[in-house]
Image (spheres, rainbow, N blue to C red):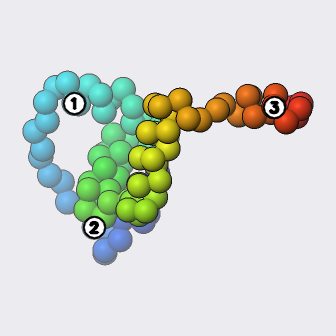
Amino acid sequence: MSTDSDAGGDGEMEKINVRVPQSLLAQVDDVWEERGYANKSEFIRDALRDAVNPPTQLSEEALAHLAESRKQREQGETVSQDDVKDRLGIDD
């Protein structure tokens, strides 16, 4: 979670008016505080920063590995951690 101190620039803030659907605003009201933000404005500024500078994304190779893992899981080609422990006689 970002904070206002890393907003960059000269630190001056400008107020803007934004129209959002009531349902989206209700969702924002439900989550900003539980995610540790000091206020709703901080939450929205953080969302805007993420929109302008998206978080790092997984590489194509990592995405391909994840897709293969999902395929293997769907086809029943994987076993659970508990099954592996049982097979190897490992106790927690």
Q: Does residue 38 appear in this view?
A: no
Q: Secondary structure at mark 2?
A: loop
Residue 67 - label: none
Distance from Cα at disc 1 to Cα at disc 3: 49 Å
Name the amino acid, label 2: Glu
Q: Nearer the viewer, mark 2 or mark 1?
A: 1
Residue 24 on image: x %, y % = 22, 30
At x 64%, y 32%, the residue is 79
According to the picture, the residue beneath numbered tag 1 turns out to be 24
Name the amino acid, label 3: Arg
According to the picture, the residue beneath numbered tag 3 turns out to be 87
According to the picture, the residue beneath numbered tag 2 turns out to be 12
Q: Quarter of the image containing the C terminus?
A: top right
Residue 56 on image: x %, y % = 40, 62
Name the amino acid, label 1: Leu
Relative to residue 14, is residue 47 drawn left or right?
right
At x 82%, y 28%, the residue is 86
Q: Secondary structure at mark 1?
A: helix
Q: Earlier in the sequence, mark 2 or mark 1?
A: 2
Q: Nearer the viewer, mark 3 or mark 2?
A: 3
Relative to residue 46, is residue 69 drawn left or right?
right
